[in-house]
Image (cartoon, rainbow, N blue to C red):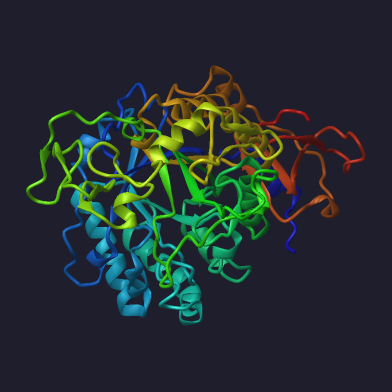
Amino acid sequence: MKFLSAATLLAAATQLASARYIMYADEWHLSDLGNRTTNAGIDTAIMAFVSTNDFLTEEGGTFELFEPVETFRARFDPGVKVLAAIGGWNDVNYTLTMKDEAARTRFANNCKKLIEKYNLDGIDIDYEYVGGNGADYKTVPNTEKVWEIDAFPLLLEATRKAIGQDKLLSIAVPGLERDMMAFTPDTMPKIVPLVDWFGIMTYDFMNRRDNFTKHHTDLVGSRASIQRYLDLGLPASKATLGFAFYAKYFTIDPKSNCAQEPLGESCKTVALELADGSDNGLSGALTFEPSSKPTTAPTNLTESPDGTCGGTTGYKCSAGNCCSSGGWCGNSEAHCGLSCQAGWGQCNGLTAIQSWQNALAKPVVDEANGGHYFLDRNASLFWTWDEPVHIERKFDEIVDVLGVANVMAWSLAEDSLDWRHLFAIQDGVKQHCLSEIEGFNDAACAAKENTTTTWTTISKEALSRAVESYKGGAYYRNTPHFYAAPVQPRGLPAGFAEVNAHGHSI
């Protein structure tokens, strides 16, 4: 380990690490993207997604976004940074962007073109997942993707060189340990200096590849996920805690012991995907949008002339057919099962939207793990989601304790029913001094930012892996706590007091 001198530490104490409040908006959820009141304090807004197919040729593609960038920018405070996200789940062609040096150069040059076309502030790369376990994991095994692990840092290096140091470059990274193949003790030192932050997807901890119930975005799981990246050498100043504006549901096995133990390995699910790894319709997600509330179909509906149905078209399906969540008539499980639109055709049993109302009415609050869940025995569904009470705890017990400098959420319109999750994050950002928007943070934040710390001599034995700076103070991390000069309590090294990331004594 390389030890830093006291002079170096003193210099570090005067540096300010940036903090960010990041919000995604996606092309599938555009019902209500809010305004400068709902979106107050958001300093970084990311438009998702641009397909990797647009980056495979020298001339590049159309780089189509869901609305004009200036229209999008105007939804936020002046000074907001706007990025475009590339990739996303199901975009399996990401692998072609980094297969060799020529491909990486094409990708990087096209990133520059994308930025210039829309006057963007940067690029967010969302490859799910480098090294395997993506949407195609059944058809392209992980053994055929090992090479991606070494290629990814090279892609980032080429991209940084092309777009320059004055543009932002971020990566969305998996929250589940099983998907973190690309992030190793060998690759992290190469990746970390190239990017401005890691957007850690601390959600989807339960997905259709699991076979028993668990939370999908709880406090305990989120903290463990962040800690794994810190342990790999990610500075807390580049770590980003993720929030999800949606609930997830999973069909449970009726023969399982869910009635006694609805959360955990005793409560098994049915198979949740097909042999090729695709969705079988027995699990899914519902957002906190108005569209996730039950609606009553009008009477005297006209039968669909073209196979479309639902509220957007006003048509009902013919007898024996069901209206899918996507607005198409049919008689498959995808049409008639959990995602069926009741009233616009036939539905087989309780729909997910109907079950979701039961979950919201009688949730189980898991204080130990920090999450909400509900077991709907009538529908044989397990529900898991986040609420403001847990969001507040995540700021106190993850952002503060681990020193995480950034937060993000997926995605903006998904909370548009009442904005309760968005406002909870907004409060946390304001109180914990995380927004770069001038004047948004609490007044007390300015005093913290202007505070300097005088260090005493620091022994080599006192140092942990790295020294970091945060809001005008300096500390070193000895997981999971932080230490800063100049007090000595409870047997800590001479000259140190145990504090949280904002300089508050513990």
Residue 160's spot in the image, x, y percent? 39, 61
Q: Is residue 309 left or right of residue 7?
A: left
> Would residue 24 be found to the left or right of residue 270 on screen?
left
The residue sitting at 33% across, 64% down in the picture is 91
Q: Residue furthest top?
A: 443
Quadrant showing the N terminus: bottom right
Q: Nearer the viewer, residue 167 or 34?
A: 34
Is the residue 307 above or below the residue 455 in the image?
below
x, y percent for residue 142? 50, 76
Q: Residue 455 at what x, y percent from top left?
A: 76, 38
Q: How many marks?
A: 0
Q: Give the position of the C terminus as an image quadrant.
A: top right
Residue at 51%, 33% in the rendered image? 359
Residue 399 vertical position relative to residue 28 in the rendered view, above or below: above
Is 356 rendered above or below residue 104? above
Q: Which is more toward the observer, 25 or 137?
A: 137
